[in-house]
Amino acid sequence: MTDLERTRERSPVPKDWTYAPAPEARDIVHIEERYGHFVGGEWVEPAETYSTISPASEEPLAQVGQATAEEVTGAVDAARDAFENGWSDISPSERAKYLFRIARILQERSREFAVLESLNGGKPIKESRDVDLPLSAAHFFYYAGWADKLEYAFPNRRPRPIGVAGQIIPWNFPLLMLAWKIAPALAAGNTVVLKPAETTPLSALLFCDVVRQAELPPGVVNIVTGDGRTGTAIVKAGVDKIAFTGSTEVGKAIQRELAGTGKRLTLELGGKAANIIFDDAALDQAVEGIINGIYFNQGHVCCAGSRLLVQESIYEPVVEKLKRRLATLRVGDPLDKNTDVGAINSRQQLEKIQELVASGEEEGAEIYQPPCRLPEKGYWFAPTVFTNVAQSYRIAQEEIFGPVLSILTFRTPEEAVEKANNTPYGLSAGVWTEKGSRILWMAERLRAGVIWANTYNRFDPSSPFGGYKESGFGREGGRHGLEPYLDFS
Amino acid sequence: MAQAPALPRGFELPLEPRLPRIGSVDAVALEERAASLAKRSIKREAKVFALELAIRMMDLTTLEGQDTPGKIAALASKAIRPDPSDPNIPSVAALCVYPNLVPTAVARVEGTGVKVASVATAFPSGQSPLEAKLDEVRWVVEHGADEVDMVIDRGAFLSGRYAKVYDEIVRVKEACGDAHLKVILEVSELGTYDNVRRASLLAIAAGADFIKTSTGKLPGAATLPVTLCMLEAIRDVYEETGRMVGMKPAGGIRQAKQSVQYLVQLHETLGVDWLTPDLYRIGASSLLNDVLMQLRKERTGAYQSADYFTID
């Protein structure tokens, strides 16, 4: 062998590099066998219970209460009592103090909450650790800052608390949605009765421990658990306001129920957001944005970028890059630190996703799923991309709320706007372009509550969030987020 | 001799086969992606795999005015057998030295599989006449260097004379003959990721076998985001033309943990095909001992004092 041949000899290439499991320790969080309702600062033994599970393994985690109308009334009475006898009168800076305490305790106990959130909800630990928990704490910090500045937030309008707020939250970001609801309500001087989603009650129940640790006066925060029947009971109970985040269907039912009662209402409902990629966008980063837009939290995000609108001139490279990137997504154990896509939250949701995906195939769209091995137990769905999608297909119209992306194309900015707005929803949109002027042009025309430019699914407590049209009304976050919890005179 | 096409801004290079469009890079999103990849948790056998690979990909480097044949001899021994107490530890990929020390290095590593890389073309500034640069390249190749690490003319690049930069790389590549050419962009002088991407594509178009981040002579050398930016350029070239270009981050990689982060980024950007010293190198002068220390910890379960690893 000559020297030249030796230098040209190829080194062996490994077949693969399998990452060893890197599970987050589960024993940091203690789960009780059975939980009651948290009313007036005490645990109340529930009349009826059901089992809450881990969607990744179907393993039962605890028995939790199914609150009856009477139990809900008890919680509302406790909230009313706390509101009238103390909470609405204490000095605003005192209220701020409690909120600051809660924020700090959440930070201190963030690992514990993150593990519980992933265990009960199925989301990857890296998301609950890096997104849900920091944002939840940030929300409390942010509204703590407003508590003693309401007069300045709304000059000459004399803001007053409205009373008892009934709050019903979804299962996709259990603790974060709790923070979005409770922080502004308390900062404004209200008391709350909150119901976490049927499938993800545990982080809200652990939050009761934080409430006690912060020595919040009893009855200011009350947590009742249960399914839709409990939600209905809250809507019908003697509350002054309902704040609901969830499906459009339920939102409409609540609005019908409340019509004429004088109770105030804010709704944050579904979405079918367009994520719009122009041909001058930074493509590799746009692809990351697409991935983050639809596979973040298994697509269980009301503002998910579930409709991808790609300018036709870059359609092929974008789809190619997207498929390549899809193959590197790691689907599996939510508690593994390297997991990118976790478990579907419930069997019911999985069936809904399966049904809609089947309809997409039937209607003629082309499906792509990367090769990935899904665990046998639990609820799983592989990251999915549909090409050849027509605007009229159900997968382009209906909210799937799962890791399923529909790709459509457009030719001009006008067409992009037209297609993006052609939906009953209007929660969010994404625009990817290097041109600043085009971002502003698009933002003026897109009918959506949040428009992200060259990023997606980015949240900040100071930034208001909410929808147009069937995506609901009312804003959460920012100064705007205080208004639904205040009366003005 | 090849003449450089003028680079029309923002469009494809008029070359066959077509190179990818230059496009642009979003700094915020690039840095976010690099940061999220750096959070991968690599444990046990996956970590041992990465650490051994890092050694096999290492260009063990010394580029000092005080380099002597004695220093090169010591480093060559280290390169061939990094841990005398553990015969399973592989040799590094190459020894990277200044031109004057090439003959010594070649004599020391001959027959061991460890290659000799020489910096050239008026390293680190590149501010010399082209003929002088070419002479230097021919000299190191004649004296047995397997690989040449050249620097681009950043002065020309930043003043928009892309053709000059391109021509120079083409000429150096010719002068290299069979030796592999690594083109150093010196990213910290380029200022933006857009420039890094443009320079990467320019160097690849001109014939680079590898593109390399830095000379190691400036603060702010290799970073995860800038390396990702270059890997994405390499990926685009591969997808457009099928040509596989190598990558070498250099400068500032001192800890085993960093080397694992770089390899995770490589793995998840270009795939398993690039996990070979033929297509990826890590330029480092002080990384090796930390990698050895981590490997021994994985083997024995305990960290050992730095005194158990040779300083060369």
Image (tube, coloured by chain):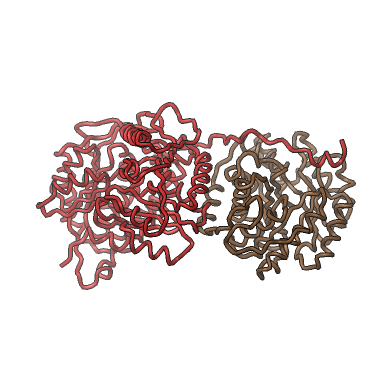
Name the residue at 60% across, 46% down: B239
Quarter holding the N terminus of chain A is top right
Question: In the image, is A132 to the left or to the right of A373?
Answer: left
Closest to the observer, A341 or B208: B208
Closest to the observer, A89 or B104: B104
Q: Is residue A215 visible?
A: no
The quarter of the picture where residue A124 lies is top left
Q: Is residue A13 visible?
A: yes
Question: In the image, is B19 to the left or to the right of B152?
Answer: left
- Which residue, as the protein is rendered here, is positioned at the far bottom? A156
- Which residue, as the protein is rendered here, is positioned at the far left? A260
- Residue B67 rendering spot, x and y as whole percentages: 84, 57
Name the residue at 52% across, 56% down: A282
Q: Colour of chain B?
A: brown
- Residue A469 rendering spot, x and y as whole percentages: 25, 54
Closest to the observer, B88 or A2: A2
Vertical order, B307 against B132 (above or below): above
- Which residue, as the protein is rendered here, is positioned at the far top? A376
Q: Colour of chain A?
A: red
How many numbered marks, from 0 up?
Answer: 0
The quarter of the picture where residue B159 lies is bottom right
Quarter holding the C terminus of chain A is bottom left
Vertical order, B119 against A254 (above or below): below
- Residue A217 rendering spot, x and y as whole percentages: 25, 52
- Residue B186 rendering spot, x and y as whole percentages: 69, 61
Question: In the image, is A301 to the left or to the right of B29?
Answer: left
The quarter of the picture where residue A392 lies is top left
Closest to the observer, A468 or A379: A468
